Image: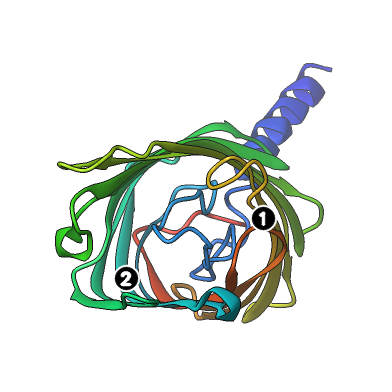
Amino acid sequence: MLRASFFLGALALTTSASAKDACSLWADGMPVGQVGASLYESPAGSDRVCPRSSVSLSERPYLLADAPNFYGHILLGTELAASYAQTDKLELFGSLEVLRSDTVISAVSSSYTGLGDATLGARYVLVRDTYTAAALHGHLVLPTAIQLYDSASPFTIDLGGSVRHVLTDRVHLRGHLDLIATTHVGPGPTNLRVGLAPTVGLDWRAGKAFGLTADLANSFGYDALYDYTALGLGFRFAGGDRFGSELGVRLPLAGRERALAVAELSFGVRLGALPSND
């Protein structure tokens, strides 16, 4: 009896130590989380739950065309981003738009080419078990593209949380909620704007090299009482254990958002030790 109890206890400890959790699945370079393309002109909004160390380079075109009001906005940004998983619960991250081309077509047209936005942030995992992971994040968008703005530069803070739930080994369900506030620093008016952005998404991994993701993103209160509902689609690829890329597109479906579409093409490399998914 004593031997049987010892054997069962040892087996339970071994099983627990080697059990998968929601963050150890898909532990390679393939992108995870929200579709990269964002309708916010600044790179605010949560992206994933689980910490990882990585570097990435992305290209983001944004197109707005309002012919009846003779207004257009074309933005092209090249962004370099990095993240560092200090522990399995804490991640520090940041990004810099190393080149931003911004053209406004209106009665008084303008154009800008130079340094874009910079961001700093952190996320902390609150829950990490077999099927579910949940994290909180704080994210600052810094006004580094000073020459882009006439008088006051925008300063954005994004606070929120994300949850990821494993439905099967190939299908994960996501939820994100962001509180995004923007003010302006400088001699001009502050123009405080505060919005709430809930998003739900579904990730599907067809195999080791290819995956698809879909988001239904919403925004309330930032520009109007109801800003938009938008569909996001992402085509994801992995090469080996560390390399990944994504082609993401976001299309407004309803609301006051005037952008025709925004897209993002990104390439990333995962660094450091990879989580065990045995």
Q: Nearer the viewer, residue 95 or 5?
A: 95
**Lower position in the chain sequence, tag 1 or tag 2:** 2
Residue lying furthest right? 1
Q: Quadrant of residue 107?
A: bottom left
Q: Position of residue 32 (x, y in %)?
A: 57, 61
Label 1 – label 2 distance at C-alpha: 25 Å
- Which amino acid type is marked by label 1? Tyr
Residue 232, compared with residue 143, is above or below; it is below
Of marks 1 and 2, the one in the foreground:
1
Q: In this figure, which residue is indicated by the disc labeled 2?
A: 79
Tell me the residue at 72%/32% (across/down). 12
Q: Can residue 21 be seen in this view?
A: no
Q: Residue 14 carries which label?
A: none
- Which amino acid type is marked by label 2? Glu
Callout 2: helix, strand or loop? strand
Q: In this figure, which residue is indicated by the disc labeled 1?
A: 228
Q: Position of residue 274 (x, y in %)?
A: 45, 59
Q: Can residue 65 be seen in this view?
A: yes
Q: Is residue 11 left or right of residue 44?
A: right
Q: Where is residue 119 in the image (x, y as percent from the top left)?
A: 29, 52
Q: Nearer the viewer, residue 193 or 141?
A: 193
